[in-house]
Amino acid sequence: MNAPPPLSSRSVLLRFALIAFVLLVIVLAFAYVAGCLTPQRLTAQSLVNQLQANAGVFPGYRRNHAKGVCVAGYFESNGNAQPYSIAQVFAPGRTPVVGRFAVPIGNPYGPDSSAPLRSMALRFTQANGQQWRTGMNSMPVFLVNTPQAFYEFLQAQQPDPATGKPNPAKVGAFFASHPETAPFLAWVKTAKPSASYVTESYLSLNAFEFVDANGARHAVRWRMVSETPDTTPGGSEPNYLDADLTQRLAQGPQRWHLVVTLANPGDPTNDATKAWPSDRRDIDAGTLVLTSSTPQESGACRDINYDPLVLPDGIQASDDPLLPARSAAYATSYLRRTSEEAHLPGTADAHSTQEAK
Ligand code: HEM
């Protein structure tokens, strides 16, 4: 066998140059994705970093809506939404649900009265294996309509090291330069932290699209309307919501109606600060029945990322720019919190029995 001819020093240099070039491209690609090349570009990391800067870091917990409780039950569809969406969840019958109620604050130990709203997140698992995940808030409109504005709001809310509180001048300047916040501000003036998760109704706020059997698309928003509404505010004790939920569930299942609102042509689908006119057609699609609750540290909801873009066939995202930003930020928060769980005292065992979902 003939030995290969020796490489000339020029071709050795060329090979090294090629390897160095490929490495440089890889490093630049990572730097771009991490936002290092475009520091002014808003990333999921910067949004979650800002949430952490405002509330602190509580290892293993969600970076927003950190205080919460897991729930389970089912959705009983009545078939009314079936003409508008082929999603299996809307065929008559039951779909199992794993959910979570929460207080939208970053501190899992903060008092229940810290915010005048509550949230409900649900994961429906259809018989065909597809899932529908949704996170809803108990307010009529969202504060802002773009991820950038949400980021600026969070920056304005960052506690001043001197006082431990947001700087009122910065907060005032934010609202003065964001007139789209007016409907939220009008609502928040009268909003009170409720005494119960059960008495609240929860809204998708973002628009989505239903797709019917003919492939036609229908712009929708949805909400879970409590069968036992009550506006009584909660007391001053820090943790009344969990006790209230346990006590109500001990008396029997708790129910909400899934109401789907169909948009009229021209209704905004990309602006969560604008409610649709109240005369839009509502469809009562069925009943959510919750039967049990579990602390979030050991419950099935802990390792679920309620990403609003996990959707079954028959439900699609709208053009609302908040949706992809939510999806990316929730994934970042999820990765951070689940990678911390194994190091938490008392949660390692629960973690090993949970399937990452
Ligand atoms: C750009 C805007 C937004 C950002 C950056 C953001 C960020 C976050 C983050 C980081 C979490 C924790 C996720 C996790 O660790 O699983 C969260 C939870 C949540 N967010 Fe948002 N959010 C935004 C807008 C909204 C909107 C418009 C809604 C409307 C309903 C909403 C509802 C919720 C709910 C219900 C939860 C709790 C989910 C759960 O219980 O696991 N968020 N948000």
Image (cartoon, rainbow, N blue to C red):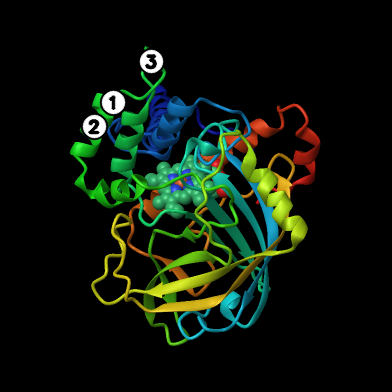
Residue at 41% across / 47% down in the picture? 191
- As shown in the figure, which amino acid type bears the numbered disc 3? Thr
| Residue 147 visible in the snapshot | yes
| Residue 331 visible in the snapshot | no
Q: Where's residue 299, x and y in %?
A: 72, 47
Residue 104 numbered tag? none
CA gap between label 2 and label 3 equals 17 Å
Residue at 74% across / 63% down in the picture? 252
Q: Where's residue 106, x and y in %?
A: 51, 34
CA gap between label 1 and label 2 equals 6 Å
Residue identified by numbered label 1: 168
Say what secondary structure mark 2 lies in.
helix
Q: Where's residue 98, x and y in %?
A: 67, 58
Task: Give the quarter of the image for residue 131.
Answer: bottom right
Say what secondary structure mark 3 lies in.
loop
- As shown in the figure, which amino acid type bears the numbered disc 1? Pro
Q: Where's residue 108, x and y in %?
A: 59, 33
Crowding at mark 2 (Cα within 10 Å: few <14, some 14-19, many 20+) = few
- Mark 1 touches mark 2? (CB < 8 Å): yes
